[in-house]
Image (spheres, grey):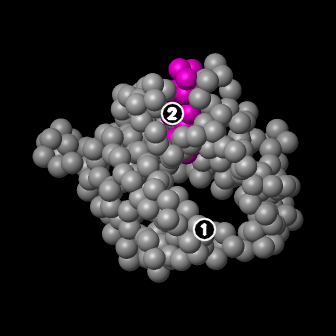
Amino acid sequence: RMDKPPLPMFTSCCPAWIRFMEYNYPELLPNISSCKSPQGMFGAILKSYYCQKNHIDPKDLYVVSVIPCTAKKFEAGRPELAVNDIPDVDMALTTRELALMIKEAGIAFNRLPGEEFDDPFGIATGAGKIFGATGGVMEAALRTAAHMLDGTNEKIDFMDVRGVPGIKEATYRIAGKEVDVCVASGLGNARKVVEMVKSGEKNYLFIEIMSCPGGCVNGGGAPIQRDSVRNSIDLRAVRASVLYNSDRENELRCSHDSPVCQMLYDEFLHEPGKGKAHSLLHTTYTAR
Protein backbone atom coordinates (compact mmCIF):
# COMPACT_ATOMS: atom_id res chain seq x y z
CA ARG A 1 0.00 0.00 0.00
CA MET A 2 2.94 2.34 0.55
CA ASP A 3 4.15 1.70 -3.03
CA LYS A 4 0.85 1.81 -4.93
CA PRO A 5 -1.97 2.86 -2.62
CA PRO A 6 -5.52 2.72 -4.03
CA LEU A 7 -6.72 6.25 -4.69
CA PRO A 8 -8.43 8.29 -3.54
CA MET A 9 -7.49 7.63 0.06
CA PHE A 10 -10.12 8.15 2.75
CA THR A 11 -9.38 9.05 6.36
CA SER A 12 -9.91 6.42 9.06
CA CYS A 13 -10.32 8.30 12.35
CA CYS A 14 -14.15 8.33 12.52
CA PRO A 15 -15.56 4.95 13.66
CA ALA A 16 -19.10 5.70 12.49
CA TRP A 17 -17.72 6.40 9.01
CA ILE A 18 -15.76 3.13 9.07
CA ARG A 19 -18.87 1.18 10.05
CA PHE A 20 -20.83 2.97 7.30
CA MET A 21 -18.26 1.89 4.70
CA GLU A 22 -18.04 -1.69 5.98
CA TYR A 23 -21.80 -2.08 5.50
CA ASN A 24 -22.45 0.06 2.42
CA TYR A 25 -19.28 0.25 0.33
CA PRO A 26 -17.10 -2.77 1.18
CA GLU A 27 -15.52 -2.59 -2.26
CA LEU A 28 -13.85 0.68 -1.19
CA LEU A 29 -12.38 -0.59 2.09
CA PRO A 30 -8.90 -0.85 0.46
CA ASN A 31 -9.09 2.91 -0.13
CA ILE A 32 -9.41 3.70 3.58
CA SER A 33 -6.20 4.58 5.39
CA SER A 34 -5.02 1.63 7.48
CA CYS A 35 -4.04 3.99 10.31
CA LYS A 36 -5.87 3.41 13.57
CA SER A 37 -7.81 6.30 15.02
CA PRO A 38 -6.04 8.52 17.59
CA GLN A 39 -7.88 6.59 20.31
CA GLY A 40 -6.60 3.27 18.98
CA MET A 41 -3.04 4.49 18.46
CA PHE A 42 -2.77 6.03 21.90
CA GLY A 43 -4.12 2.93 23.59
CA ALA A 44 -1.76 0.69 21.65
CA ILE A 45 1.24 2.83 22.62
CA LEU A 46 0.20 2.87 26.28
CA LYS A 47 -0.09 -0.91 26.35
CA SER A 48 3.25 -1.45 24.64
CA TYR A 49 5.82 1.34 25.02
CA TYR A 50 4.44 2.78 28.27
CA CYS A 51 4.04 -0.64 29.89
CA GLN A 52 7.51 -1.67 28.79
CA LYS A 53 9.10 1.49 30.20
CA ASN A 54 7.27 1.16 33.51
CA HIS A 55 7.44 -2.64 33.89
CA ILE A 56 3.67 -3.06 33.76
CA ASP A 57 1.84 -6.10 32.41
CA PRO A 58 -0.43 -4.74 29.63
CA LYS A 59 -3.25 -6.86 31.03
CA ASP A 60 -3.04 -4.81 34.24
CA LEU A 61 -3.34 -1.43 32.52
CA TYR A 62 -6.90 -0.16 32.09
CA VAL A 63 -7.13 2.52 29.41
CA VAL A 64 -10.07 4.93 29.37
CA SER A 65 -10.67 7.42 26.56
CA VAL A 66 -12.64 10.62 27.07
CA ILE A 67 -14.21 11.64 23.79
CA PRO A 68 -17.21 13.59 22.43
CA CYS A 69 -18.21 10.55 20.35
CA THR A 70 -20.65 7.73 21.12
CA ALA A 71 -19.30 5.64 18.20
CA LYS A 72 -15.94 5.39 19.96
CA LYS A 73 -17.63 2.98 22.36
CA PHE A 74 -18.27 0.64 19.43
CA GLU A 75 -14.75 1.20 18.14
CA ALA A 76 -13.15 0.32 21.48
CA GLY A 77 -14.79 -3.10 21.23
CA ARG A 78 -13.64 -3.85 17.67
CA PRO A 79 -11.47 -6.98 17.59
CA GLU A 80 -9.38 -5.20 14.96
CA LEU A 81 -8.32 -2.69 17.63
CA ALA A 82 -6.51 -5.16 19.82
CA VAL A 83 -2.96 -6.50 19.98
CA ASN A 84 -2.50 -10.10 21.11
CA ASP A 85 -6.17 -10.13 22.21
CA ILE A 86 -5.54 -7.15 24.52
CA PRO A 87 -7.81 -4.22 23.56
CA ASP A 88 -6.11 -0.92 22.84
CA VAL A 89 -8.82 0.87 24.83
CA ASP A 90 -10.84 -0.73 27.62
CA MET A 91 -13.53 1.92 27.97
CA ALA A 92 -14.67 5.02 26.10
CA LEU A 93 -16.40 7.71 28.15
CA THR A 94 -18.15 10.59 26.43
CA THR A 95 -17.43 14.12 27.56
CA ARG A 96 -21.06 14.37 28.66
CA GLU A 97 -20.69 11.25 30.83
CA LEU A 98 -17.50 12.58 32.39
CA ALA A 99 -19.14 15.94 33.12
CA LEU A 100 -21.96 14.13 34.90
CA MET A 101 -19.47 12.12 36.97
CA ILE A 102 -17.64 15.32 37.93
CA LYS A 103 -20.90 16.95 39.04
CA GLU A 104 -22.02 13.88 40.97
CA ALA A 105 -18.66 13.85 42.78
CA GLY A 106 -19.23 17.46 43.88
CA ILE A 107 -16.14 18.76 42.09
CA ALA A 108 -16.24 22.45 41.17
CA PHE A 109 -14.28 21.92 37.97
CA ASN A 110 -14.18 25.58 36.99
CA ARG A 111 -12.44 26.38 40.29
CA LEU A 112 -9.62 23.89 39.89
CA PRO A 113 -6.16 25.35 39.15
CA GLY A 114 -4.84 24.79 35.65
CA GLU A 115 -2.27 22.04 35.18
CA GLU A 116 -0.22 20.58 32.37
CA PHE A 117 -0.90 17.12 31.02
CA ASP A 118 1.26 14.30 32.37
CA ASP A 119 4.49 13.20 30.72
CA PRO A 120 5.54 11.49 28.57
CA PHE A 121 2.53 12.22 26.36
CA GLY A 122 1.55 15.64 27.62
CA ILE A 123 2.87 17.66 24.68
CA ALA A 124 0.36 18.30 21.91
CA THR A 125 0.85 19.94 18.54
CA GLY A 126 -1.62 22.33 16.99
CA ALA A 127 -2.24 19.77 14.26
CA GLY A 128 -3.43 17.30 16.88
CA LYS A 129 -5.80 19.83 18.41
CA ILE A 130 -7.67 20.62 15.20
CA PHE A 131 -8.60 16.96 14.61
CA GLY A 132 -11.87 17.73 16.38
CA ALA A 133 -13.11 20.09 13.65
CA THR A 134 -14.20 19.06 10.19
CA GLY A 135 -11.20 19.63 7.93
CA GLY A 136 -8.75 19.38 10.80
CA VAL A 137 -7.49 15.91 9.95
CA MET A 138 -7.06 16.97 6.34
CA GLU A 139 -5.14 20.10 7.32
CA ALA A 140 -2.88 18.20 9.70
CA ALA A 141 -2.10 15.68 6.96
CA LEU A 142 -1.45 18.40 4.39
CA ARG A 143 0.99 20.16 6.71
CA THR A 144 3.06 17.03 7.11
CA ALA A 145 2.72 16.02 3.45
CA ALA A 146 4.02 19.42 2.38
CA HIS A 147 6.96 19.07 4.76
CA MET A 148 7.75 15.52 3.64
CA LEU A 149 7.65 16.46 -0.04
CA ASP A 150 9.41 19.82 -0.05
CA GLY A 151 11.31 19.72 3.25
CA THR A 152 9.87 22.91 4.70
CA ASN A 153 7.13 24.04 7.06
CA GLU A 154 6.27 27.08 4.97
CA LYS A 155 2.68 26.02 4.27
CA ILE A 156 0.85 25.79 7.59
CA ASP A 157 -2.64 27.20 7.14
CA PHE A 158 -4.93 25.48 4.63
CA MET A 159 -7.94 27.75 4.94
CA ASP A 160 -10.09 26.22 2.19
CA VAL A 161 -10.69 23.01 4.15
CA ARG A 162 -11.89 24.86 7.26
CA GLY A 163 -15.46 25.81 8.14
CA VAL A 164 -18.78 24.04 8.67
CA PRO A 165 -20.08 23.53 5.09
CA GLY A 166 -20.95 19.87 4.58
CA ILE A 167 -18.70 19.41 1.53
CA LYS A 168 -15.53 21.39 0.87
CA GLU A 169 -13.18 21.00 -2.09
CA ALA A 170 -9.71 22.44 -2.56
CA THR A 171 -6.70 22.17 -4.82
CA TYR A 172 -3.24 22.82 -3.42
CA ARG A 173 0.11 22.92 -5.13
CA ILE A 174 2.55 20.87 -3.06
CA ALA A 175 6.10 20.18 -4.23
CA GLY A 176 5.16 21.22 -7.75
CA LYS A 177 2.10 18.96 -7.99
CA GLU A 178 -1.60 19.79 -7.95
CA VAL A 179 -3.36 17.95 -5.12
CA ASP A 180 -7.17 17.77 -5.19
CA VAL A 181 -8.76 17.11 -1.80
CA CYS A 182 -12.25 16.93 -0.35
CA VAL A 183 -13.67 17.24 3.16
CA ALA A 184 -17.17 16.06 4.06
CA SER A 185 -19.07 15.91 7.33
CA GLY A 186 -22.41 14.22 7.89
CA LEU A 187 -23.07 10.77 6.42
CA GLY A 188 -25.49 12.17 3.85
CA ASN A 189 -22.68 14.29 2.44
CA ALA A 190 -20.27 11.38 2.78
CA ARG A 191 -22.53 9.25 0.57
CA LYS A 192 -22.67 12.03 -2.03
CA VAL A 193 -18.87 12.23 -2.14
CA VAL A 194 -18.46 8.45 -2.37
CA GLU A 195 -20.96 8.26 -5.22
CA MET A 196 -19.20 11.08 -7.09
CA VAL A 197 -15.91 9.20 -6.73
CA LYS A 198 -17.42 5.90 -7.87
CA SER A 199 -19.03 7.48 -10.93
CA GLY A 200 -15.79 9.19 -11.94
CA GLU A 201 -17.35 12.62 -11.58
CA LYS A 202 -14.64 13.62 -9.12
CA ASN A 203 -10.99 12.67 -9.00
CA TYR A 204 -9.71 13.52 -5.54
CA LEU A 205 -6.42 12.35 -4.10
CA PHE A 206 -7.35 12.49 -0.41
CA ILE A 207 -10.76 12.68 1.28
CA GLU A 208 -11.59 13.40 4.92
CA ILE A 209 -14.93 12.15 6.24
CA MET A 210 -16.51 12.80 9.63
CA SER A 211 -19.96 11.41 10.38
CA CYS A 212 -21.08 14.26 12.62
CA PRO A 213 -21.89 17.58 10.89
CA GLY A 214 -19.06 19.91 11.79
CA GLY A 215 -16.85 17.11 13.06
CA CYS A 216 -16.16 15.75 16.53
CA VAL A 217 -16.95 19.10 18.15
CA ASN A 218 -20.56 18.25 17.33
CA GLY A 219 -20.29 14.63 18.44
CA GLY A 220 -23.16 12.64 19.89
CA GLY A 221 -21.42 12.48 23.26
CA ALA A 222 -20.80 16.22 23.56
CA PRO A 223 -22.69 18.40 26.05
CA ILE A 224 -26.29 19.08 25.01
CA GLN A 225 -27.34 22.71 24.87
CA ARG A 226 -30.84 24.17 25.23
CA ASP A 227 -32.83 24.92 22.08
CA SER A 228 -32.53 28.63 22.81
CA VAL A 229 -28.75 28.30 22.60
CA ARG A 230 -28.63 25.95 19.61
CA ASN A 231 -31.03 28.13 17.62
CA SER A 232 -29.06 31.33 18.18
CA ILE A 233 -25.45 30.13 18.04
CA ASP A 234 -23.70 27.77 15.62
CA LEU A 235 -21.95 25.71 18.28
CA ARG A 236 -20.00 23.81 15.63
CA ALA A 237 -18.30 26.98 14.48
CA VAL A 238 -17.77 28.30 18.01
CA ARG A 239 -16.21 25.07 19.25
CA ALA A 240 -14.06 24.74 16.12
CA SER A 241 -12.81 28.32 16.51
CA VAL A 242 -11.47 27.43 19.96
CA LEU A 243 -9.45 24.59 18.44
CA TYR A 244 -8.07 26.76 15.63
CA ASN A 245 -7.17 29.55 18.06
CA SER A 246 -5.31 27.04 20.22
CA ASP A 247 -3.54 25.72 17.13
CA ARG A 248 -2.51 29.21 16.07
CA GLU A 249 -1.06 29.94 19.52
CA ASN A 250 0.76 26.61 19.72
CA GLU A 251 4.53 26.70 19.28
CA LEU A 252 4.41 23.29 17.58
CA ARG A 253 1.82 23.27 14.80
CA CYS A 254 2.78 20.21 12.76
CA SER A 255 2.43 16.57 13.78
CA HIS A 256 5.95 15.69 12.65
CA ASP A 257 7.38 18.37 14.97
CA SER A 258 6.11 16.60 18.09
CA PRO A 259 9.13 15.71 20.27
CA VAL A 260 7.11 12.88 21.82
CA CYS A 261 6.37 11.40 18.41
CA GLN A 262 10.01 11.72 17.41
CA MET A 263 11.10 10.08 20.66
CA LEU A 264 8.71 7.18 20.14
CA TYR A 265 10.15 6.42 16.72
CA ASP A 266 13.75 6.83 17.90
CA GLU A 267 13.35 4.61 20.96
CA PHE A 268 10.61 2.16 20.09
CA LEU A 269 8.81 2.22 16.74
CA HIS A 270 11.85 2.98 14.56
CA GLU A 271 10.43 3.06 11.00
CA PRO A 272 6.97 4.35 9.98
CA GLY A 273 4.67 1.76 8.47
CA LYS A 274 6.87 -1.21 9.27
CA GLY A 275 7.59 -3.58 12.15
CA LYS A 276 6.21 -2.37 15.46
CA ALA A 277 4.76 0.77 13.92
CA HIS A 278 2.67 -1.26 11.50
CA SER A 279 1.50 -3.88 13.99
CA LEU A 280 0.60 -1.35 16.68
CA LEU A 281 -0.64 1.68 14.76
CA HIS A 282 -2.43 0.14 11.78
CA THR A 283 -5.63 -1.85 11.50
CA THR A 284 -7.88 -3.73 9.08
CA TYR A 285 -11.53 -3.48 8.09
CA THR A 286 -14.26 -6.08 7.60
CA ALA A 287 -16.97 -6.20 4.96
CA ARG A 288 -20.27 -6.72 6.77
Query: For the residue marked with disc 2, what is the amino acid?
Result: Ala
Q: Magenta region's main secondary structure? A: helix
Identify which residue is drawn at 50% across, 46% down: 206
Residue 128 in the image: above or below residue 267? above
Give left or right: position of 177 versus 245: right
Residue 148: assigned label: 1
Q: Position of residue 31 (x, y in %)?
A: 61, 36
Q: Quadrant of the N terminus?
A: top right
Does residue 158 show up magenta in the picture?
no
Q: Position of residue 8 (x, y in %)?
A: 54, 40
Q: How crowded is mark 1: few (under 14 residues within 10 Å), some or many (20 or more)?
A: few
Total marks in image: 2
Residue stretch rendered in magenta on the structure: 12-25
Q: Nearer the viewer, mark 2 or mark 1?
A: 1
Identify which residue is drawn at 50% across, 59% down: 177
Could you say which is closer to the camera, residue 282 or residue 82?
Answer: 282
Give the secondary structure at mark 1: helix
Query: For the residue marked with disc 1, what is the amino acid?
Result: Met
Give left or right: position of 124 versus 80: left
Q: Distance between the residues labelled 2 and 1?
A: 30 Å
- Looking at the image, can residue 28 be seen? yes
- Where, by quadrant of the figure, is residue 160 drawn? bottom left
Does residue 20 show up magenta in the picture?
yes
Identify the residue under disc 2.
16
Q: Position of residue 186 (x, y in %)?
A: 37, 35
Residue at the extreme front of the image, as rendered: 176
Give the secondary structure at mark 2: helix
- Looking at the image, can residue 112 be seen? no
